């Protein structure tokens, strides 16, 4: 079993509220912590069995002389205590020199807590995480592992996880241990072969991966090493190398791996929302020729920023009316023409705008010749009465095209 270390416990949110400052023993912060205990008893040493993080206000030391305080530290060090955290301000205004000097001599980590947080809160959070982490030492069937991963990912995405220590312990029990320098992002996939494609991408990037079946597809967290550059682009490139036909993957925004669990959940939610929108968006690359090997379509929440802003938490009657008004005002003449003449002008306009108004790229994506594209664009500009590439019309037209597509795709 890989136990939680003193360094990891000091990084818990609840301890962060206590404003911890490591005064000595920085090189010993990777000591495993077996339990977190609080006591004000001067003679606590013989009652401990080693591996504890001891919390104290120093009440039992306030009236002791320098020799007694040094003896206190020596006894704790000899018992193999992982570290001592002293809350300053009530019993002790500042850390006594003899405590600091003796701790330094003994290689015992000594931490000053400069803000008041009830020790029961710290102990409860840390010990819950320690107990949960112990599950990693107990083998369980693959099906049970998938269930645990799915439960954790669901709790993160739904915002119902209990605490940061609980999330970290559950993740570690599933062998998901992102390092401090990693960048973490959520992923959601639908289609055949999703687990294998995600596994290959993680392997190619030397990334940590936690995945499980969730909500009719596959949900995942990837922790990408810092050297990979922009994590979203790196994962997109790694996933795009797959050949699973019909597979679509969406990615959320990246966040530091040591960010709060709510940030992990936010990235997962973004990925799942982006996946739902992705299937209505024109492809960013030309389709493969008939009979050619299929590929993975990869998108991200930032690539779908317009759609996400338009839909928010979902299309309500009020938002539908707002989008319908935008579509009617901006694209009315095109819609009237399409109602009377078989054509594809609105889609042509959106693909053209999305791709920098590049005729070559637009023609390839629509599978039409350059001359046919020019004829469509002339018709669009004639009906709208303005150049579609003009800076003052580009944004509104693209927004209206997105809104039109979303309204048509929505149930």
Image: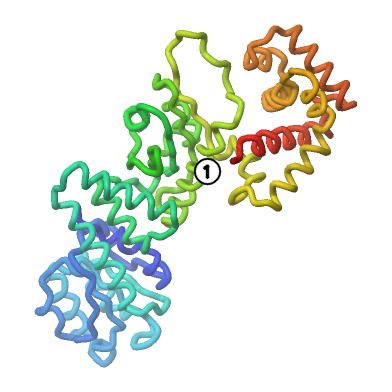
**Closest to the observer, 137 or 306:** 306
The residue located at (70%, 38%) in the rendering is: 403
Mark 1 is surrounded, within 10 Å at the Cα level, by few (under 14), some (14 to 19) or many (20 or more) other residues, namely many
Residue 146: quadrant of the picture: top left
Q: Height in image: 149 above or below 126? A: above
Q: Position of residue 246 (x, y in %)?
A: 44, 24
Residue closest to the far bottom: 63
Residue 204: quadrant of the picture: top left
Residue 223 in view, yes or no: no
**SS under mark 1:** helix
Q: Position of residue 59 (x, y in %)?
A: 28, 88
Q: Position of residue 58 (x, y in %)?
A: 28, 84
The colour style of the image is rainbow
Q: Position of residue 243 (x, y in %)?
A: 40, 19
The residue located at (82%, 33%) in the rendering is: 332
Residue 214: quadrant of the picture: top left
Q: Height in image: 59 above or below 359? A: below
Q: Which residue is mark 1?
A: 273
The residue located at (25%, 47%) in the rendering is: 174
Residue closest to the far right: 385
**Closest to the observer, 355 or 385:** 385
């Amino acid at each position: 079993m890989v136990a939680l270390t003193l360094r990891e416990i000091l990084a818990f949110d609840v301890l962060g509220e206590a404003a911890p400052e490591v005064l000595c023993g920085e090189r010993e912060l990777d000591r495993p912590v077996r339990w977190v205990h609080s006591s004000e008893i001067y003679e606590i040493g013989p009652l401990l069995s080693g591996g504890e993080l001891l919390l104290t206000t120093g009440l039992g030391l306030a009236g002791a002389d320098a020799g007694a305080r040094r003896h206190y530290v020596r006894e704790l060090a000899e018992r193999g205590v992982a570290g001592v955290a002293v809350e300053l301000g009530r019993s002790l205004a500042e850390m006594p020199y003899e405590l600091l000097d003796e701790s330094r001599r003994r290689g015992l980590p000594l931490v000053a807590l400069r803000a008041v947080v009830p020790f029961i809160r710290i102990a409860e959070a840390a010990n819950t995480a320690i107990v949960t982490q112990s599950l990693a030492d107990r083998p369980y069937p693959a099906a049970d592992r998938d269930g645990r991963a799915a439960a954790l990912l669901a709790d993160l995405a739904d915002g119902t996880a209990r605490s940061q220590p609980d999330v970290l312990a559950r993740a570690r029990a599933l062998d998901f241990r992102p390092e401090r320098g990693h960048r973490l992002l959520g992923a959601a996939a639908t289609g055949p072969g999703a687990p294998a494609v995600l596994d290959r991408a993680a392997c190619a990037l030397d990334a940590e991966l936690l995945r499980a079946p969730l909500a009719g597809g596959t949900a995942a967290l990837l922790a990408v090493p810092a050297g990979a550059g922009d994590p979203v682009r790196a994962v997109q490139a790694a996933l795009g190398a797959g050949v699973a036909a019909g597979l679509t993957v969406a990615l959320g925004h990246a966040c530091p791996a040591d960010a709060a669990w709510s940030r992990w959940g936010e990235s997962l939610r973004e990925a799942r929302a982006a996946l739902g929108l992705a299937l209505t968006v024109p492809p960013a690359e030309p389709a493969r020729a008939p009979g050619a090997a299929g590929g993975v379509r990869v998108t991200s929440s930032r690539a779908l920023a317009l759609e996400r802003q338009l839909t928010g938490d979902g299309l309500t009657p009020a938002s539908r009316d707002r989008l319908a008004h935008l579509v009617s005002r901006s694209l009315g003449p095109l819609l009237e023409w399409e109602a009377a003449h078989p054509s594809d002008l609105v889609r042509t306009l959106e693909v053209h705008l999305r791709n920098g108004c590049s005729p070559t790229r637009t023609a390839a994506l629509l599978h039409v010749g350059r001359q046919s594209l020019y004829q469509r664009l002339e018709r669009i500009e004639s009906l709208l009465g303005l150049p579609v590439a003009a800076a003052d019309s580009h944004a509104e037209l693209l927004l209206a095209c997105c809104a039109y597509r979303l309204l048509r795709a929505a149930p």
